[in-house]
Image (cartoon, grey):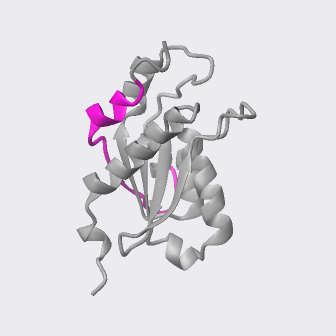
Amino acid sequence: MAMVCEELDHEALLRIAIAESQKARDAGNHPFASILVGPDGKVLMTQHNAYMPDHDMTGHAERVLMTRASTTLPHDLLKECTIYTSAEPCAMCAGAIYWTGLKRCVYGMTEKQLKEITGNHPENPTLDLPCEVVFAAGQRKVEVIGPILVEESAKVHEGFWG
């Protein structure tokens, strides 16, 4: 019997995204990552931040993942999917999640908490706008779960932005 969305283990799945953010950092990239999970709990795609090597300021993990998902997966599947992301999606990424048609977004630390860590770093001028504000401006609901596992999400950033 297939697992339905309401039975997904959000913490376990978010921990996969957090572990991927550590892998992104270990590879020399910004410490962010996202995963796309189907309604059966299967990880469909993983995406690290794509700032490097081209210094793409729009290469946020969520935005790149949504581009990949929306160009390769059917809309009927996407509308039942969940994105798990190590930090709250910024306004750009929340827009991409909305336009891709996802059902749900689960995130670790908030944009406000990220801003406290990164300060005014030129590679991450954090846009402190809750993703729920972006989603609320839309014509359909995107369920939001977060912040959760904040300390685990923040730990990956220790010493990176200094």
**Residue furthest bottom as drawn:** 1
Relative to 161, is 2 above or below? below
Tell whether position 161 is magenta.
Answer: no
- Tally the numbered discs: 0
Residue 146 in the magenta stretch? The answer is yes
Residue 162 image point, x, y percent: 48, 12
Check the image and report above or below for 115 versus 29: above
Q: Is residue 45 left or right of residue 12?
A: right
**Is 77 left or right of 109, judged from the image as shown?**
right
Across and down, in percent, residue 5 comes to: 32, 71
Looking at the rendered image, the quarter that the N terminus falls into is bottom left
46 over 119 or under it: above or below: below
Q: Give the percent coordinates (x, y) of residue 156.
A: 39, 31
Q: Residue at x 52, y 39 (%)?
A: 24
Range shown magenta: 137-157
Q: Residue furthest front?
A: 26
User: Would residue 151 be visible to someone looking at this image?
Assistant: yes
Residue drawn at the location 56% of the way across and 36% of the way down: 27
